[in-house]
Amino acid sequence: MATPKTVAFHTLGCKLNYSETSSMARLFVQAGYVEADFAQGADVYVINTCSVTEFADRKCRNIVRQALRHAPQAFVVVVGCYAQLKPEEIAAIPGVDLVLGAAEKFRILDYIDDLSKSPGKGMVRASAVREAKDFVHAFSFGDRTRSFLKVQDGCDYKCTFCTIPQARGRSRSSTVEQIVADAQAIAQMGVKEIVLTGVNIGDFGNGTEVIEGIRPRKEALFIDLIRALDEVEGIERFRISSIEPNLCTDEIIEFVASSKRFAPHFHMPLQSGNNKQLTQMRRRYRRELYAERVAHIKHCMPHACIGVDVIVGFPGETEEDFLESYRFIQELDVSYLHVFTYSERANTPAAKMPDPVPMHERKRRNQMLSILSEKKRRAFYAQHLGQTRPVLFEHSPEPGMMSGYTDNYIKIEAPIDEALLNQVLPVSLENILPHGVVSIQTPVQAH
């Protein structure tokens, strides 16, 4: 009997990429492959790339080199956003055998049998991004604690700094029925938390072109999706990974506040607290609307966690502009920031804008906002000390410890108790530890 072929995966980037990597892995397993650990060597390596940062090329090259150190004769396949944006550049990386674009990546098995190791350039199969029309449903599995469930893909927005529409195509989404079925399948696997992922998930239902030849009803919007998911038995809680402030409606906020399973946790990209930059970025809101959204979330759920994406050093951002943005964020009742240093991306309008901010200045502004983020996170944690909140327990990277998050995204740490892992249990939040997580009162009492 022949030994089955092995495949290993490495994922760079966002939660959406992780959900898609898992779906590709299932395709290989269904075809008779055995999934292997990356470091143990494999017959095929699949690298799922990201294009959000300027380091995409460097990261991709490093992972290719690591794969070939583990298995010099392995076939190396590169997929993902970076593969769609710069397929020829990736194909020229020594050791890369196949590059698949956005429309081709889920047909990966159609190409594998045609591969042969050669010293020349890798094979490229990357059609124009407009060909990426179908929605391919995907969810991650491997970590029994949580799963990332893809509900939407692509984006119709035209933010001047962003390459995602070039990498993933037009906005399209699944149906409510398919996502509910996926959530039920995830529940059967024993997973307790589902994170809803996509490029612009609040656009669910609006941008869909075709799903398996059927045009879905336009009245199935994001609010309809989360109402349906709230009824899925076996899942303790759902999280909304990120939602645009102009799409985070009062109806959605009020539903989450009264729902059975949706966590009081919103992550809304702001990008700038200055209306001048928001206009130049072609964002679809002004800072006043963002402040209204934050205020309404806190009115409905005073305990809610609110995360914020911010870009610093956008072209034309003066020191006065930055300080105005800083003060606006400082006054917002938000819980943490994800701070990104602006980097020029090819074929974006922002890359050609005048008055670029010097890199050392971009980094200084990033550091200022990162410090503000840590202050806000600790202040948010401190507000909840002494309270009892539900925690989903999971393994910690620290030996002898377990960690977890409350429903409102406070990270806890405690000595490991194997019986508690993958359970959601109420705990008393005690103290903020020096490294920024919260200790809990033990022993934990089950429901």
Image: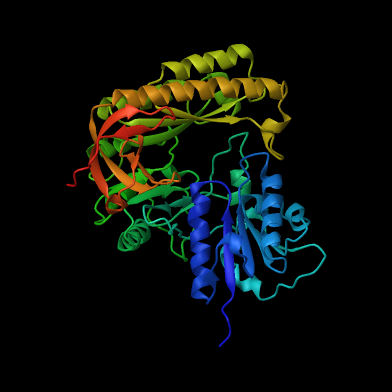
List x then y, in percent, for residue 443: 22, 41
Question: Which residue ends up furthest to the front in the rendered image?
Answer: 400
The number of numbered badges drawn on the structure is 0
User: Looking at the image, which residue is at 71% across and 27% down?
Assistant: 353
| Depth check, front residue: 358 or 180 | 358
Q: On screen, 125 above or below 336? A: below
In the image, what residue occupies the spot 53% across and 20% down?
A: 275
Q: Is residue 192 among what the camera can see?
A: yes
Query: In the image, 61: left or right of 132?
Result: right
Camera-side residue: 217 or 88?
A: 88
In the displayed orientation, state which residue is furthest to the left.
447
Of residues 224 and 35, which is closer to you in this image? 35
Q: Quadrant of residue 304?
A: top left
Q: Position of residue 153 (x, y in %)?
A: 50, 51
Front-lying residue, 446 or 87: 446
The location of residue 420, given as percent across then percent down, is 28, 50
Say whether residue 323 is left or right of residue 335.
Answer: right
Name the image quarter holding the N terminus.
Answer: bottom right
Q: Residue furthest right?
A: 120
Image spot of residue 91 (x, y percent): 75, 58
Q: Can residue 209 be seen?
A: no
